[in-house]
Amino acid sequence: MVTQGRAARTREALIGAAAADMDAKGFDGATLAAISASARVSMGALTFHFSSKRALAEGVVEEASAITRARTTAAVAGQSSPLPAAIALLQCLADLLDESVVVRAAALLARERPEAVPGWHRAWVPTLRRLLREADRAGELHQNARPVAVATLVVHLLTAVEVYRGSPMGEGLGAKGALSRLLPVVCRGIGTKGNVTL
């Protein structure tokens, strides 16, 4: 049991260190040596848990996906109807991008290495699509706002917010602040009049 606990702590430390290094330098800039040193774990222990940098990146995405599923499930649970639930999901994702280096790294990896690392988007896009279909059936979407197109717009919006938060133009707003500027405009375009409050 002690050995299992130590192994779990080592794995957690490696994922945290890898997320921080990949968030700062991207996949290509991150190195196993730097991750090992940051986690205070030997290279032998690192390669015992993760056979390659790609495997470590997959571990980061897996952890971020678990965090994202748990938080977004809670965020949408208390909403009164599908469109507000979809908006709550998006706001939750922006919060996670500000709060969690693991989620930020997974979002970056989804952009940089989509062919190599299973995407973080799988943790939340299916829920978003379901909520938008339900919103359409409930008459909450504007007649010209098709659920598939709105889902694509939201994915692009969140990607822009994620990139914007770290740019000089981000003005220190973070993902949540950047999203709060853009979301009212989007909601006016996709929702039927008066059915969305932010």
Image: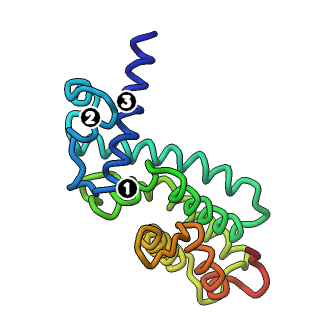
Q: CA distance from mark 1 to mark 2?
A: 24 Å
Q: Amino acid at mark 2?
A: Ser
Q: Is residue 84 above or below residue 120?
A: below
The residue indicated by pointer 3 is: 11
Q: CA distance from mark 3 to mark 1?
A: 20 Å
Circle 1 sits in a helix, a strand or a loop, which is it?
Answer: loop
How did the renderer colour the structure? Answer: rainbow
Measured as percent of width and height from the top left, residue 108 is found at 36, 60
Measured as percent of width and height from the top left, residue 129 is found at 55, 66
Measured as percent of width and height from the top left, residue 49 is found at 28, 28
Residue farthest top in this picture: 1
Q: Is residue 180 above or below residue 185?
A: above
The residue indicated by pointer 2 is: 36
Q: Is residue 126 above or below residue 38?
A: below
Task: Classify 10 Å Cα crowding around label 3: few (below 14), some (14-19), many (20 and above).
Answer: many
Q: Amino acid at mark 3?
A: Arg
Circle 2 sits in a helix, a strand or a loop, which is it?
Answer: helix
Q: CA distance from mark 2 to mark 3?
A: 11 Å
* Labels 2 & 3 near each other (Cβ < 8 A): no
Instruction: Count how many numbered circles sit on residues in the image.
Output: 3
Between discs 3 and 1, the one toward the N terminus: 3
Task: Classify 10 Å Cα crowding around label 1: few (below 14), some (14-19), many (20 and above).
Answer: many
* Labels 3 & 1 near each other (Cβ < 8 A): no
- Residue 25, located in which quarter of the rendered image? bottom left
The residue indicated by pointer 1 is: 119
Quarter of the image containing the C terminus? Answer: bottom right
Q: Amino acid at mark 1?
A: Gly
Measured as percent of width and height from the top left, residue 165 is found at 47, 69
